[in-house]
Image (spheres, rainbow, N blue to C red):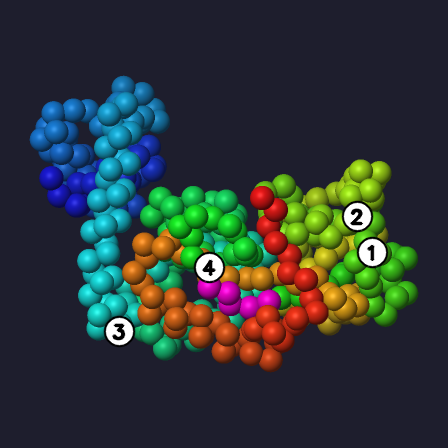
Amino acid sequence: MTLVQLQYVLAVAEYKNFTLAADKSFVTQPTLSMQIQKLEKELNIEIFDRSGQPIKLTQIGEKVVEQAKIILREANKMSHLVFEEKGQVEGDFYIGVIPTVLPTLVPMFYRTFEKAFPKSNLIIKEMQTDEIINALQEGTLDFGIVVTPLHEEHIVEKVLYYEPLVGYVPASHPLHAKKSIDVSDLESDSLLLLKEGHCFRNNVLNLCEPAKLKAQPVRLDSGSLDTLVKLANEGYGMTLLPSLHAEDLPSEFKKNVRYFTDPAPTRQVSLVYHHSNLRTSFVENLGKTIQSVLRGKIFLDKNENVTSPLISLPK
């Protein structure tokens, strides 16, 4: 039994196709199939049911896959341990980032980190918070950047920054005449929100008074903040944006941004990882890099923003 054979098994389990799994593993399909057959022969079992398409795991195959994940996760820690001992930041780092953070934050730090640590390879994936938590627990993801606190056992949270929210209020909306807005001004019948599954949707809804939500359900939702801005400009209502996203708006749109009166709603953004993760040098250096590019743009310490309540994910 070899680690490579286990990697091939996981690839087929993921893609449910030998040809595609071989392509993703950068080997020929006959090579991948032969190695998996060797493993099946050694264990005297069939890991995959090849009788139909897509390929399915057998009952014992499901257990083999779960154990293979554990073995490979532990094996990968060997190189991580060596790099940590040498104080090196090297290798692949798989990072899941939520959709409302990725477009604004990642372009700000990616090249800076890449230049500082040329032997590192950041592999960024856009994922929802629940997906990131599951992937961290399964060991298929190294780190996540999400809104916290998560209150998840075995998940470590390192706060990166605190980001205020702002209102995007077009000229057609009654609140546009106000220089600043208050949380109590929010009316659910005119709020444009992200789709179900986005934590930012829950963040915004948590700001609204329950009575207003029950009386007037939200009319429209979308999958991206940019689409919400477009809908607002078309007269469908107003929306809330993270302040970094608002800074990236075209100049003609920035006139529609309205800041909240104190205490302004603020979200806490953190780097998260499984407690068994040994790559502490990466955690420290990525955190420093992100905070260095954000310094002066956003709150880096809660003491800078003590008047603003943090938005927490609902449990």
Q: Are marks 2 and 1 in contact (CB under 8 Å)?
A: yes
The reply to whether residue 278 is visible in this rendering is: yes
Which numbered dot is residue 87? 3
**Residue at coordinates 64% horizontally, 60% vertically from top-left?**
310
Question: How far apart in space, not on screen, are marks 4 and 3 (Cα)?
Answer: 22 Å
Q: Can you give x and y, in whole percent of width and height, for residue 217 in the image?
A: 79, 39
> Which residue is located at x 26 percent, y 73 percent?
87
Image position of 23 (left or right of 161): left
Where is mark 1, residue-wise?
A: 184
Question: Spatial distance from mark 2 to mark 3, Cα to Cα?
Answer: 50 Å
Label 2 sits on residue: 209
Crowding at mark 1 (Cα within 10 Å: few <14, some 14-19, many 20+) = few
Which circle marks residue 157 in the picture? 4
Is residue 234 visible in the rendered image? The answer is: no
* Image side of residue 2 versus residue 7, left or right: left
Work out whether residue 192 or residue 157 is closer to the camera in this orientation and state it.
157
| First along the sequence among labels 4 and 3 | 3
Magenta stretch holds residue 194: no
Tell whether 315 sits left or right of 18: right
Nearest the eye: 40 or 201 = 201
Give the side of residue 36 with respect to residue 283, left or right: left
CA gap between label 2 and label 1 equals: 8 Å
Q: Going 61% across and 74% down the picture, which residue do you hit? A: 303
Give SS at disc 2.
loop
Q: Which residues are magenta?
A: 157-162
Indicate the quadrant containing the N terminus: top left, top right, bottom left or bottom right: top left
Sequence-wise, the earlier of marks 1 and 3 is 3
Amino acid tagged 2? Glu
Q: Secondary structure at mark 3?
A: loop
Q: Circles 1 and 3: CB distance less than 8 Å?
A: no
